[in-house]
Image (cartoon, helix red, strand yellow):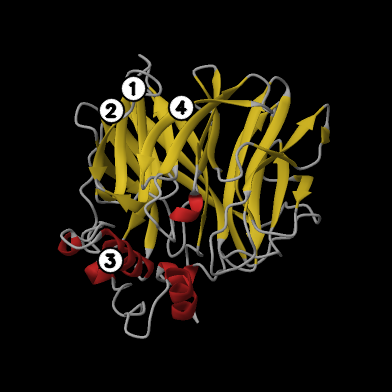
Amino acid sequence: MRALLFCAVLGCTANDPTPTATDAGDDAAIVAPKVELGRHAVMIAETRQVIPGPGLPAEAPPQNSNNNLDVVRHEGRVYLAWRTGPDHYASDKTALYVISSADEKTWTFETRVTAGFDLREPRFLSLNGSLFLYLARLGNDPNRFEPKGMSYVEKKDGAWGALTDFGDPTFIPWRARVERGKPYLVAYDHGEQIYAPAGIPIGIHLFTTTDGRAWSDLGTVSSGGGSETDFTLGDDGTLFAVIRNEAGDATGFGSKICRASELTKWTCKSDPKKYDSPLMFWQDGEAYLIGRRHLSPTGNYDLAELRDRPLAERWFKNQVDYKVWPKRCSVWRYVQGEDRIAFIADLPSRGDTCFPARISGDKPGEVIVYNYSSPIDGPDVPWNEGQLGPTNIYRHVLRFDAK
């Protein structure tokens, strides 16, 4: 079943290799990266399962697969949104729930968003007294990735409004945030090219807004094979960013590590690792990244032995290899001055994992990260098996202590 789903997505033929999990989950084959701490010693102080779990409202029942999520502080409460469905694949049974809490233990139902088709990439923005939840509309075919545009729901004066479409229908939203006092949305166009590449460049755009409803395009910051992208701004305004380069282009496959002194003029370097679902944040002089780690012997998405082969062949074989290895959700550091990513630590995670979101903690140096994973006390399954579920949502408390 897993191989059939995979080949339906990638277009395998009878002569193509189908993915198997043979030896991929063998701990002996897993090589831990070198730890390269910067200004901080990083400790995972606490991990707690939230979904499924006690304290959830009856109006928000989790299904087998609980994954894409976001979290935000708004008017004294913590809001959590997540996608729930039969498995990780597109389905008309998908729902996005929003719940809120004063203590992150007992939750109150806020709203349920459904549309008769798959919904993903929930992204909060607290702005001018309103709370916005942005999301991507997709299709219902579990074997296809079919972007249909962006929508939002708004909570204003205590009430949630209707699902409202906005922007170009080819766009996928990735991160919405207020950075150094200004709201931004990072989105990419032509998302359908990620899993059916036809040579059409994917453009990554940076938007801003004054009201959360109408967004102004500040420009295309990257064009090629990139898609999921996040950035943070340093104390001096320097931008640090990571782009997932899954579709591939002349620079290769994996990721692009970017820096800019002007907001929309990014300079990027290629990295053969693929930091899926990138989340970036600035913490006391350091730019940190939370993103997926590939547990192959090299950790690389871009297979070195294929680099003289045609782009389409590389894309296909990179995808096949990536599917059959377990994953982690990991904390990384942007090494300033070298424009590279260094490993710090794994969050408790395994199998199908990594769609992180963060809020500040109550204590100095404390960061709270919400993330999904296959059961962290279960078997270390390959990614393609984990995508069939179950997957849960966990809350992690991280401490960044100056060394």
Instruction: State the image quarter where residue 379 is shown.
Output: bottom left
As measured in the structure, the alpha-carbon distance from the residue carrying label 3 to the one carrying label 2 is 41 Å
Q: Find numbered disc 2 in the image and state the secondary structure of the residue it sits on.
A: loop
As measured in the structure, the alpha-carbon distance from the residue carrying label 1 to the one carrying label 3 is 41 Å
Residue 39 is tagged as: 2
Front tag of 1 and 4: 4
Task: Identify the amino acid type marked 1.
Answer: Gly
Task: Identify the amino acid type marked 2.
Answer: Arg
Front tag of 1 and 2: 1
Residue occupied by mark 3: 313
Circle 2: is it few (<14), some (14-19), or many (20+) Cα within 10 Å? few
Task: Identify the amino acid type marked 4.
Answer: Gly
User: Sequence-wise, which precedes: disc 1 or disc 4?
Assistant: 4
Residue 285 is tagged as: 1
Q: Do the residues labelled 3 and 2 touch (CB within 8 Å)?
A: no
Q: In this view, does 319 lie above or below 171?
A: below
As measured in the structure, the alpha-carbon distance from the residue carrying label 3 to the one carrying label 4 is 32 Å
Q: Are marks 1 and 4 in contact (CB under 8 Å)?
A: no
